[in-house]
Image (tube, rainbow, N blue to C red):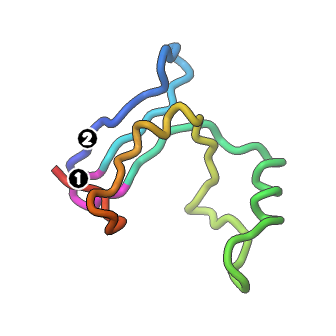
Amino acid sequence: MGLRFLGIIPNTPVDDSPTIWLDEDTGDLLIQSYKATEEEVKACQEIGSIPGHSTDVPVHETIIRLPAVMLKCIPRPEGGNGEVPRT
């Protein structure tokens, strides 16, 4: 797996470090961030996503809270095709 570091929250202390990496093989993002609180997870479940889709969070998934300042670290699609550029 070829990972590329994209960014870390500015002025991060040693024990508080939301970070984003890009898997250059798949274009997937790996995100280390704050766990969503039970209240936030419940709110996500109440809103749901698409009709008929379960709102349970499977054991192999989680909901994280990504600080807004980290959005600048997420690669933007080139040409509007929705794909993350690979290097």
Q: Residue furthest left?
A: 87
Q: Position of residue 65 (x, y in %)?
A: 63, 42
Q: Position of residue 7 (x, y in %)?
A: 38, 31
Q: Nearer the viewer, residue 33 or 80?
A: 80
Q: Secondary structure at mark 2?
A: strand
Q: Is residue 24 magenta?
A: yes
Q: Which residue is mark 1?
A: 24
Mark 1 closeness class: few <14, some 14–19, many ≥20 residues within 10 Å: some
Q: Is residue 5 magenta?
A: no
Q: Residue at x 24, y 55 (%)?
A: 85
Cβ–Cβ under 8 Å for marks 1 and 2:
yes
Q: Position of residue 11 (x, y in %)?
A: 49, 14
Q: Secondary structure at mark 1?
A: loop
Q: Residue furthest bottom?
A: 52
Going from N to C along the chain, the mark reached first, 1 or 2, is 2
Q: Residue at x 33, y 57 (%)?
A: 77
Q: Residue at x 81, y 56 (%)?
A: 43
Give, as a three-letter code, the residue at label 2: Arg
* Disc number for residue 6: none
Q: Which residue is mark 2?
A: 4
28 above or below 46? above
Distance in Å between CA atoms under marks 1 and 2? 7 Å
Looking at the rendering, which quadrant does residue 84 occupy? bottom left
